[in-house]
Amino acid sequence: MLTDSDLSALLITLQLAALTTLILLLLGTPFAWWLARSRWRFKYLLEAVVALPLVLPPTVLGFYLLVALGPQGPIGVLLQALGGQSIAFTFTGLVIGSVCYSLPFVVQPLQNAFAAIDQRLLEAAATLRAAPLDRFFSLVVPLAKPGFLTAATLGFAHTVGEFGVVLMIGGNIPGETRVLSIAIYDHVESLQYGQAHRLSAALLLFSFLVLFLVYRMNQRRREQTPHR
Amino acid sequence: MNANIHLHFSLALSGFDLDVAAEIPGQGVTALFGRSGSGKTSLLRCIAGLERPTHAYLRINGVLWHDSVQHLFVPPQQRGIGYVFQEGVLFPHLRVRDNLLYGFRRTPGAEQVESLQRVVDLLGLQTLLQRYPVQLSGGEKQRVAIGRALLNNPRLLLMDEPMASLDRSHKKEIIPYLECLHRSTSIPIIYVTHDPDELIRVSDYLLLIEAGRLIAQGPLEQMLARIDLPIARGDDAGALVSATVLEHDEQFHLSRVGFAGGELTVSAIDQPPGSEIRIRIQAKDVSLALEAPGPTSIMNILPARVVEMQAHGRGRMVVRLDVGGVPVLARITQKSQQRLALHPGSQVYAQIKSVALLT
């Protein structure tokens, strides 16, 4: 069915998407919480920055990341000064690129879910002896569950499908940074339509399956909380 | 007065500043009474620690909760209070049972004096325990909210117009529970309301708030007998009188009650002779005559002395009477006052058309 090189591309893609989603949920949750609750007057500046990847061509984002992460870029220089190596054209570089690229897909659903939570519920919990972190886990997490689900799904799926950023900063190193979308592109370039077909179909099926499961879970939740 | 709650808050609100300093009894129900938008809810939120005004002082039964001078602020979760919001504010993802136990499970073992069973019985929640908040009516939600606050084992219970969002029939459903709560708990309660009827039914002590200022405070009976306060101008103005049930007249469904100023015949009271009761005589149900009236359908006519009078809008006035040492209010027209030449010291007969039993 799939060649070894295709299989490794699939594996790298899944690893990249899973790691990116995890990092985004960990960083995005407190950030989205802050965005939803803060009354800082220049908050919209940060919101605009978060939304940038939505409108920016991925190649532009990838280009700047390449410059920043490269041996002469600020982050590259910093890493080298700390004794590390340049992370452009590495899996780590891919993860950093994907986190930037998929940021709005995780932060925005979370921010919306947090903003929709009635402030008085948190006040009620405070009067009922719940400290801030307790309130977050006993109220915010369960109430924002659909938001978390949407954020994770969109973040994951969007990372799986990315192409431009990866091409700019990841290159195309088999077994290291060669992801599915690039493998498909390569097959088409070399007129291996059969291979491209199999990979594309696998990706299509996978994406549909993920979305199907998420929507079914959301549907169940709606049925479990009955309305009059 | 056993003043155990000392407070002073200054807080800028939209339109006016809240600035209230008061001493409140450490037991019973204290009402924060005033018009909508007078700052009552903000004051209650300050007491709960949900607002953090620049100038604040709050000490409860010897424990300092807030002192802006010393930069001391105990956050709400460490105060051990019960707070009942206007609309219940139940946690939508938890069943009634878990809503009730939310605070209880977070109460240190030594402070867990309340029990689920007792609260469920007190508020009639047995059949609701497995439901989600969306499946409850307004009145049921409010009962659960009160139960949740009680199960937090509070040292102070704060209630923000718990009946404001309810219609008349649901209010009737809640009031008995509140009266019952009043009798069965020793926790001091601070109760925000703008409804005079609610005020009279549930409170013992009254803080009158107007545009962010405390304009008067005192025990409820004394405050209701004052004619210089806004309450005396309202339709619900009237005196509260403590009385004792004397005897029942089965044939006519009447009871006789005695108070310091004499005896009254009222509709049958379902309590044995000797019971202590509180009755309410509304000012609009009291008319005055200079001489003892001849045959009349009014059964309660008592000699009284005019103490003071205050005119207010639309040609009306309110008169404070002394009936054997007990203050009773009467509402008459200014024209009647002129015709009868009433003045402080006048001897009159108060004709009381109806009397309402409170508890």
Image (cartoon, rainbow, N blue to C red):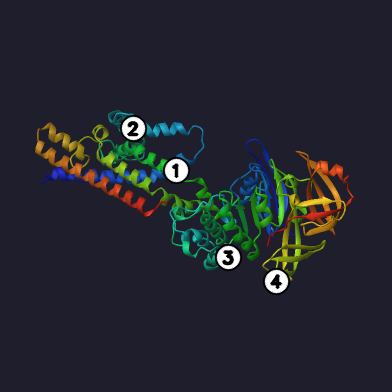
Which marked residue is nearer to the observer: mark 1 or mark 4?
Answer: 4
Circle 4: is it few (<14), some (14-19), or many (20+) Cα within 10 Å? few
Tag 1 residue: A116
User: Please, which chain is the residue tagged with disc 4 on?
Assistant: B
Q: Which quadrant holds residue A127?
A: bottom right
Q: Same chain, marks 3 and 4?
A: yes
Circle 3: is it few (<14), some (14-19), or many (20+) Cα within 10 Å? few
Locate residue B202, reporting x and y percent: 66, 57
N-term mark: 3 or 4: 3
Tell which of B338 and B238 is nearer to you.
Answer: B338
Q: Quadrant of the C terminus of chain B?
A: bottom right
Q: Secondary structure at mark 2?
A: helix
Locate residue B236, reporting x and y percent: 70, 49
Which marked residue is nearer to the observer: mark 2 or mark 1?
Answer: 1
Q: Would you say the residues marked 3 and 4 are in contact, meaning their CB atoms lie under 8 Å apart?
A: no
Q: Same chain, marks 2 and 1?
A: yes
Tag 3 residue: B111
**C-alpha gap between disc 1 and disc 3:** 34 Å
Task: Tell me: A162 left or right of B46.
Answer: left
User: Please, which chain is the residue tagged with disc 1 on?
Assistant: A
N-term mark: 2 or 1: 2
Tell which of B113 and B327 is nearer to you.
Answer: B327
Disc number placed over residue B356 in the picture, else none:
none
Q: Same chain, marks 2 and 3?
A: no
Tag 4 residue: B272
Which marked residue is nearer to the observer: mark 3 or mark 4?
Answer: 4
Tag 2 residue: A54
Which marked residue is nearer to the observer: mark 2 or mark 4?
Answer: 4
